[in-house]
Structure formats: structure tokens, C-alpha cells
Image (cartoon, rainbow, N blue to C red):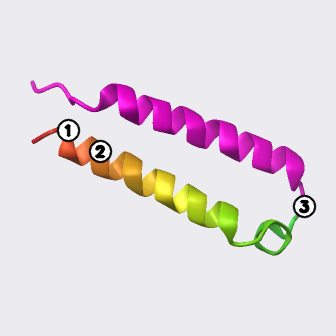
Amino acid sequence: MYRNKNTALIMILCFLLFVFLVVLIFRHITVYFVYSSGIGPLLFIGVLVTAIVMLFFKGYK
């Protein structure tokens, strides 16, 4: 079984995403998440998730 070479980087990005989401939840604890926080945090989350997925699949080659 092959080991993913990017495991450490993926774990760091997952931890950063988790911390960012927790901070965002405590700062904007409203029902209307998109309207209260704007599009910036949503783009940041999208970039982190994309980087995690790309590194995950790139590590298996």
C-alpha cells in the first residue's frame, strides 16, 4: 500500500481550515452566514479545500 507523500501538508491545511471555521463561527454566529460574513471567507474556505483535495490525490501518484 502506498503512503501519501503530502500527508503532513494535508494535515496542516486541515487544521488551518478547522481553526478558521471555528473563529468564523464565533465571530459571525447568525443564521444568515453568507450575508453577514461576505464572500471573502467563503473563497478562502474554497481555496483551502481545493488545495487539500489536490494534494491528497497528487500524493498517490
Q: Residue at horizontal 44%, vertical 30%?
A: 11
Q: Which mark is residue 23?
A: none
Quadrant in the picture for the C terminus: top left
Viewer-closest of 47 and 2: 47
Give the mark nearest the N terminus, 3 or 2. 3
Badge 2 crowding class, 10 Å Cα cut-off, few under 14, some 14 to 19, many 20 or more, is some
Could you tell me the amino acid type at mark 1?
Gly
Q: Main secondary structure of the magenta part?
A: helix
Q: Which residues are magenta?
A: 1-30
* Marks 1 & 2, CB-CB < 8 Å contact: yes
Q: CA distance from mark 3 to mark 2?
A: 33 Å
Which residue in the structure is indicated by mark 3?
Answer: 30
Residue 55 % position (x, y):
29, 44
Q: Height in image: 54 above or below 9? A: below
Q: CA distance from mark 1 to mark 2?
A: 6 Å
Give the mark nearest the N terminus, 3 or 1. 3
Q: Residue at horizontal 30%, vertical 52%?
A: 54
Q: Which mark is residue 59?
A: 1
> Residue 29 colored magenta?
yes
Residue 16 % position (x, y):
58, 37
Give the number of the mark in front: 3 or 1: 1
Q: Residue at horizontal 67%, vertical 66%?
A: 40
Which residue in the structure is indicated by mark 2?
Answer: 55
Q: CA distance from mark 3 to mark 1?
A: 38 Å
Residue 26 % position (x, y):
86, 45
Q: Residue at horizontal 28%, vertical 42%?
A: 56
* Marks 3 & 1, CB-CB < 8 Å contact: no
* Marks 3 & 2, CB-CB < 8 Å contact: no
